[in-house]
Image (cartoon, rainbow, N blue to C red):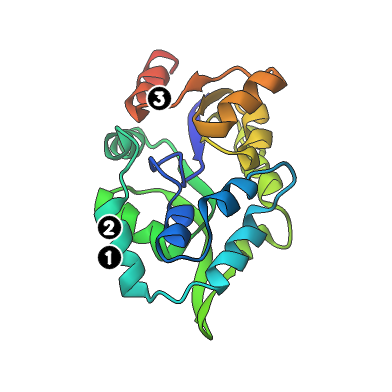
Amino acid sequence: MKWAVVSDFDGTLTLADVGDAILLEFGVFTAADIERSYAPGQSVEKWMRRGFSRLAASRPEIESFILRSMKPRAGLSAFSAFCAGRRIPFDIVSGGADIYARPLLKKWGVKAKTSFGRARRSGAGWDIEYADLDGGALPAFKAGRVKDYRDRGFRVLFCGDAPSDLRAAGLADKVYAAGRLKALCRAGGIKFSPLSDLRDAAAFIRKNP
């Protein structure tokens, strides 16, 4: 059975949550507001739509901020090349937005299939459309992507960091967790390895072909 990789983006493939960092930098939300957004039952999609609808910053301003301040998870570029070299599907499923994710992935040389919200200028802010969700919720969408690969005969390695990643983690064959997902996996009895350097994930796949 071949491996497929399904991963979150913000706080997983990046060291910080990029969407949160943008909303903080441009004064849309406070740190306390952002902390409340991670409470049980909160919707990432609604949070992003609400925040970015109030974001006055232009695309060049957003890109300038993220390209100088956001850092990738250690080993990300090497892991992307590893997956490409072995023809391992690398699928990024995220509640983040293309307006910041695509410039960062391009800068870091990451090639992957991606699902992000589409950001478009709307009035004084930005409108984010999650067409890929088809009206569903993000946790179910991520879990559905893992299930789809497993139904097609793949073993799935999943990487995540947030409450919206928990359902997908519960379905994966191997989990690398960062941030809040670690405690949630412990509470739910889901085995995981701490996500520090993505070269660890490549080494795991090599040892378990």
Q: Residue 88 falls in which quadrant of the image?
A: top left
Q: Which element carries disc 3, helix, strand or loop?
A: helix
Q: Amino acid at mark 2?
A: Leu
Query: How many C-alpha atoms fall within 10 Å of the one at disc 2: few (<14), some, or many (≥20)?
Result: few
- Using the image as rendered, state which of residue 127 and residue 29 is in the foreground: 29
Number of the label disc, if any, that sits on residue 67: 2
Across and down, in percent, residue 75 comes to 29, 32
Instruction: Please say if the residues under marks 3 and 2 sit with CB atoms less than 8 Å apart.
Output: no
Q: Amino acid at mark 3?
A: Ala
Across and down, in percent, residue 19 comes to 47, 56
Q: Which element carries disc 2, helix, strand or loop?
A: helix
**What is the CA distance from the residue labelled 1 to the residue labelled 2?**
5 Å
Seen at 69% across and 53% down, the residue is: 43
Q: Residue 152 falls in which quadrant of the image?
A: top right
The mark closer to the camera, 3 or 1, is: 1
Mark 3 or mark 1, which has the lower sequence index?
Answer: 1
Across and down, in percent, residue 84 comes to 33, 40
Seen at 69% across and 21% down, the residue is: 187
Seen at 30% across and 33% down, the residue is: 74
**What is the CA distance from the residue labelled 3 to the residue labelled 2?**
25 Å
Q: Which element carries disc 1, helix, strand or loop?
A: helix
